[in-house]
């Protein structure tokens, strides 16, 4: 028993000594492998910037240039990893990893169906010329400037400076309004004037006011003006005109400016913009005696 124990201890010591010797011998290779990975990491950062810059000169979509830069960086890191494994003489390990990648990839693909669908949707969005970084879009109740299109999500910056992150798949599956695809937008303004107003004068004054304050209009005849209804307290109209704008914020500013200038013009000409009022009329036949008589008849019944 004592001899067997001594043999086991000697065998263990021999193995530990072998491992120690191997570790000491591998230290230079290990340090070199770590150095290779560090160099690959920093090289990947510069490669990403360089490739993105070169791609942006050839491709108009910024999102595609960014993705190409990221792919180039990943390729550099992967090359560094393979080189480091080769230095450590882990070629067989690398082969085993590649052999098992197919099975693992299938399992991961089934588990990450949503993530993969967003990835492919991100690729599709990146190659869409009608959706680019810097465009002002509206989708699913959110409106803002496209800040980023990556392989996971779609980022909007709203007018109030809040960021909205939307999955790529959702963008592809839902309608999207892109304000930046055209350089013109139509401003629609609804208002009402009093029943005592000269309607022809109101129309002429409104058109002239819009033409005087918007260089894009110039001619009053380019302003559309339609009376729409006899309202409860005013005669209502719809005024429409085109402006040079590429986002909803410019359109909103133009509408605000038009309201201010029209109000000034109406005040100067004495044109009334009425607000809803209620008139209470008491018939002369209603008197205290009639009220008492009605109350007496009601009590008898």
Image (cartoon, rainbow, N blue to C red):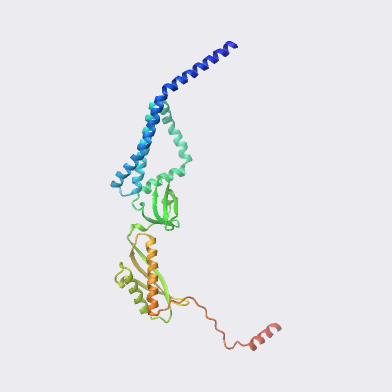
Res 301 visible: no
Quarter holding the C terminus is: bottom right
Q: Residue at x 41, y 71 (%)?
A: 190
Q: Residue at x 37, y 66 (%)?
A: 254
Residue farthest along the right direction in this orientation = 300
Q: Residue at x 39, y 77 (%)?
A: 266
Q: Is residue 290 left or right of residue 82?
A: right
Q: How many marks?
A: 0
Name above or below for residue 132 compared with residue 199. Answer: above
Name above or below for residue 44 compared with residue 127. Answer: above
Name above or below for residue 109 compared with residue 61. Answer: above
- Specify the quadrant of the image occupied by residue 100: top left
Residue 258 is situated, as x and y percent measured from the top left of the image, at 37, 69
Res 118 visible: yes
Quarter holding the N terminus is: top right
Q: Is residue 54 left or right of residue 173?
A: left
- Specify the quadrant of the image occupied by residue 286: bottom right
Residue farthest along the top direction in this orientation = 3
Please state which of residues 90 and 296 is positioned toward the viewer in this rendering: 90
Residue 47 is situated, as x and y percent measured from the top left of the image, at 33, 39
Residue 73 is situated, as x and y percent measured from the top left of the image, at 36, 39
Please state which of residues 213 and 176 is positioned toward the viewer in this rendering: 213
- Specify the quadrant of the image occupied by residue 280: bottom right
Residue 11 is situated, as x and y percent measured from the top left of the image, at 52, 15
Please state which of residues 135 and 130 is positioned toward the viewer in this rendering: 135
């Amino acid at each position: 028993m004592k001899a067997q124990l001594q043999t086991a201890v000697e065998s263990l010591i021999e193995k530990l000594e072998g491992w120690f010797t191997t570790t000491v011998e591998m230290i230079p290779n290990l340090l070199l492998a770590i150095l290779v990975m560090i160099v690959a990491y920093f090289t990947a950062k510069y490669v990403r910037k360089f490739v993105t810059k070169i791609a942006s000169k050839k491709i108009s979509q910024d999102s595609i240039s960014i993705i190409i830069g990221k792919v180039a960086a990943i390729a550099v890191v992967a090359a560094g990893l393979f080189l480091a494994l080769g230095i450590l003489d882990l070629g067989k390990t690398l082969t085993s990893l590649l052999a098992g990648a197919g099975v693992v990839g299938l399992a991961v693909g089934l588990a990450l169906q949503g993530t993969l669908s967003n990835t492919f949707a991100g690729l599709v969005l990146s190659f869409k010329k009608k959706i680019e970084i810097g465009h002002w879009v509206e989708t699913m109740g959110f409106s803002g400037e496209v800040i980023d299109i990556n392989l996971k999500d779609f980022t909007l910056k709203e007018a109030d400076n809040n960021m909205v992150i939307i999955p790529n798949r959702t963008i592809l599956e839902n309608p999207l309004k892109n304000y930046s695809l055209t350089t013109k937008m139509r401003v629609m303004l609804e208002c009402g004037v009093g029943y005592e107003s000269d309607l022809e004068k109101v129309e002429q004054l409104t058109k002239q006011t819009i033409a005087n304050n918007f260089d894009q209009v110039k001619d009053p005849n380019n302003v559309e003006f339609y009376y729409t209804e006899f309202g409860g307290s005013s005669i209502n109209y719809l005024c429409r005109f085109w402006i040079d704008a590429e986002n909803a914020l410019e359109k909103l500013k133009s509408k605000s400016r038009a309201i201010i200038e029209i109000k000034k013009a109406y005040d100067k000409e004495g044109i009334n913009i009425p607000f809803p009022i209620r008139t209470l009329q008491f018939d002369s036949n209603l008197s205290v005696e009639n009220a008492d008589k009605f109350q007496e008849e009601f009590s008898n019944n």
